[in-house]
Image: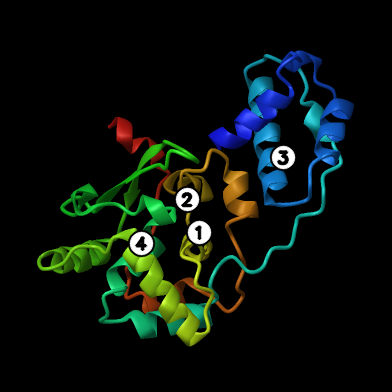
Amino acid sequence: MINYCKVIIKHFNNIYINELTTETIQNYLNGLPKNRSKEFITLYFNAALNKAVDLDIIKKNPFNAVIKDKKIKFKRNAFTYAEQQLLLEHIKGTELEANTLCYLMLGCRPNELPTKNDFILEDNLVHIYGTKNESSQHRVVDISEEFANYLTNYFKTNNLLKYSIFQARYAKLCNKIGLKPDVYILRHTFASNMRIMGADMKQVAYYMGHSSIKITMDIYTDIDRSLTKEKLLNLYEDYYYIIKTFQYLRLNG
């Protein structure tokens, strides 16, 4: 988020926020290439102006009248139910299993995978420390008792693989079984699965370190109509945590 905000501030550094007009914003967006960065800039810019309205800094959000691009159609960003079945079948009992499941249960970025000390298994909690290049936000992710028990047994004799080692071996496996080898897809899959589980998407956005629920919903969440909550619970042996209340403030007690 920080990098995109810097881009916006740098472009409009000589303009006060109450002097921004729809035309000014439209011209700026029209000059950007249609890619994923433009989507993020659009989301963050609009969110910042909405916040300014909430704080009564400006009376009206000039972004409301901006003509936005149609949502860019990226290749599927989350594994389908069938792909998840295939992946779990091939990682079961291997050195890749624990790392892969952690990404699927925590929704962290590839280089945010916690260390063993970040897991508080007695309370079913995991600390995630944000990356410097995207977000420094520290959040606490709830995990199910079943997944906590799995990790407790795993950590008795094992540690999670270092990211560079995991990435190389995970990519090799995915290429072998015909899946996209990008570890980031596991993060997208977490968001999509949590939506199927009926989770409060504000909570999911917090778990993922997003500043806006719109990012979580529009970019990270795919719809697989073959998926159901029951199928996911069965596929993952009840590892997924069922969010009952929105509790992102638990860091403050």
Residue 176 position within the rendered picture, expressed as x and y whole percent measured from the top left: 46, 85
Quadrant position of the C terminus in the picture: top left
Give the alpha-carbon distance from disc 4 to disc 3, as whole Å. 32 Å
Residue 27 placement, left or right of 174: right
Contact check, label 2 and label 1, Cβ < 8 Å: yes
Residue topped by disc 2: 204
Residue at image position (39%, 66%) is 167
Residue topped by disc 1: 191
Q: Front-most of 33 and 188?
A: 33
**Residue type indicated by callout 2:** Val
Q: Within 10 angstroms of label 2, few (less than 14), some, or many (20 or more) residues?
A: many
Contact check, label 1 and label 4, Cβ < 8 Å: no
Residue topped by disc 4: 164
Residue topped by disc 3: 42
Mark number for residue 212? none
Helix, strand, or loop for circle 1? helix
